[in-house]
Image (cartoon, grey):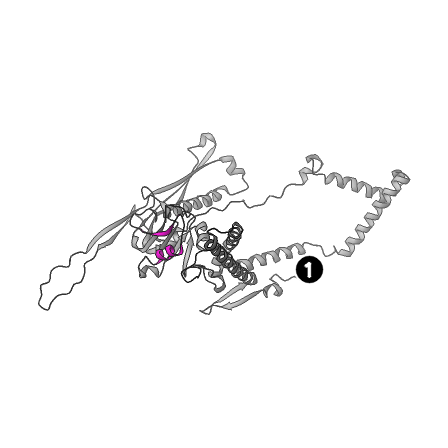
Amino acid sequence: MNTHMATRSRVPASIGMAIETKKDGEGNKAETPSETKKAITEVMTAFEEFKTANDARLKELEAKGAADPISVDKLDKINKHLDKFEDLNKRVATAEGVKKALDDLQEQFDEMETALARRSTADTPEAKAAELKQRVNDWGRGVVDAYAKGEANLTEDQRKALQDVRDEYKALSVGQDTTGGYLAPVDYVREIIKSVTEMSPARSLARVRPTGMKSISQPKRTGQFSAVRVAEQGPRSETDGLRWGNVEIPAPEAYALIDISEQNLEDSFWDLEAELREEASEQFAVLEGAEFVSGSGVGEAQGILIHDDVAETNSGAAADITADGLLSLKYGIKTAYARNASFALNRSTMGAVRRLKDGNGQYLWMPGIAMGRPNTIDGDPYVECPDMPNVQAGAFPVAYGDFRKAYTMADRVQMTLLRDPYTQATSGNVRFLFRRRFGGQVVLAEAIRKMKIAA
């Protein structure tokens, strides 16, 4: 029996030892890969370097009125390096990715075992070496003797060795199809290379309500009465002020339409219909995230930056963001909303926030990977929303608050597909029509605020 066949179908102990098993506060087991421990060290080291470089930049600004370009360049490089760990931080915080890493490792070992199993038990290294040595000797002596005596005077083994080399050369000449190119096909990878599609995670922030009607209607208190003091026998008049209103959230339609030839559907190596479903689902999510931030509310969802009743906080500097402005934004909402509040900003703004320090010289942004928690801004979580604007004069680059209380999304119809082989039949095409009905609206504006960059 080949010793290689004895390979066990599991991750070796030497690899398994690289993963430590710990318990969280609730007693659940959570495995932390050694690679994650290495990343934690790298993040914390980079953050210390970031603070040192930024402190030097601030001193240069105070002393000279301008920062050294070399210091700024160094700071930007460290900032970009920290950006690479944002996704890892999320995985560590939610204990995701460990199982996938183990599954990938198991798959690699399974492939190795399959490859080893294919080797014949008689195909030993010693036999291969002896055969190769004999062939080389026959070929080498044949070349010399053919030059000295002529090919007609070679032994049968020598002539066969020379002919084998000629045949092999022709067989391996893939430069031309007729000499072997047809026999050497390309390796077709069953994976499509796709660029990343960025979208704002609207559904993870807002409240989502499914409905079977054209819209969602919900009553809303718009005014309150006040309690007042009165003398023992004093007159009592009505404490007027309690008022009610109604909020209606429509669910308008969105669609995507694609035509594909029947022959393409028949002959394609891919399941094109499944691929189209995935693409359409992704693009509806992109539209949903964009409207959550800046939708007009007319025939589409209403954005958090568009609603007139969402209060704003000035950034505190012209065309820039400041720590005081960010803290004013945070403490501008009521305490009840702050319990579940988070920041919403894009990656570019996140880089600017990392440079900010409060009045005590403490950085507002803090990494949480070492403690298995999300990174924070002044102790509060943040969500990366690519659709939020950059820091520039007149823009609203940061929003803060309890988005779940502030914003409600209406789901009328999930994505559906209409496969139409008739409309474009004379053109040889099949039409795929995807549609969804959804909407969204700010229902409690006081639960969130937005920061405005001064002009």
Q: How many other residues sit within 10 Å of disc 1, few (<14), some (14-19) or many (≥20)?
A: few
Say which of 386 and 441 sits in front. Answer: 386
Q: Can I make out residue 29 in this image?
A: yes
Q: Position of residue 455 (x, y in %)?
A: 36, 46
> What range is drawn magenta here?
310-331
Query: Is residue 28 found left or right of 114 in the rendered image?
Result: left
When asked about the image quadrant of residue 221, the answer is bottom left
Q: Is residue 39 left or right of residue 199?
A: right
Q: Amino acid at mark 1?
A: His
Magenta stretch encompasses residue 30 = no
Q: Is residue 94 visible?
A: no
Residue bearing the label numbered 1: 4
Q: Position of residue 283 (x, y in %)?
A: 43, 44
Residue for point 52% across, 54% down: 78
Q: Is residue 328 magenta?
A: yes
Given residues 280 and 445, the one toward you in this image is: 445
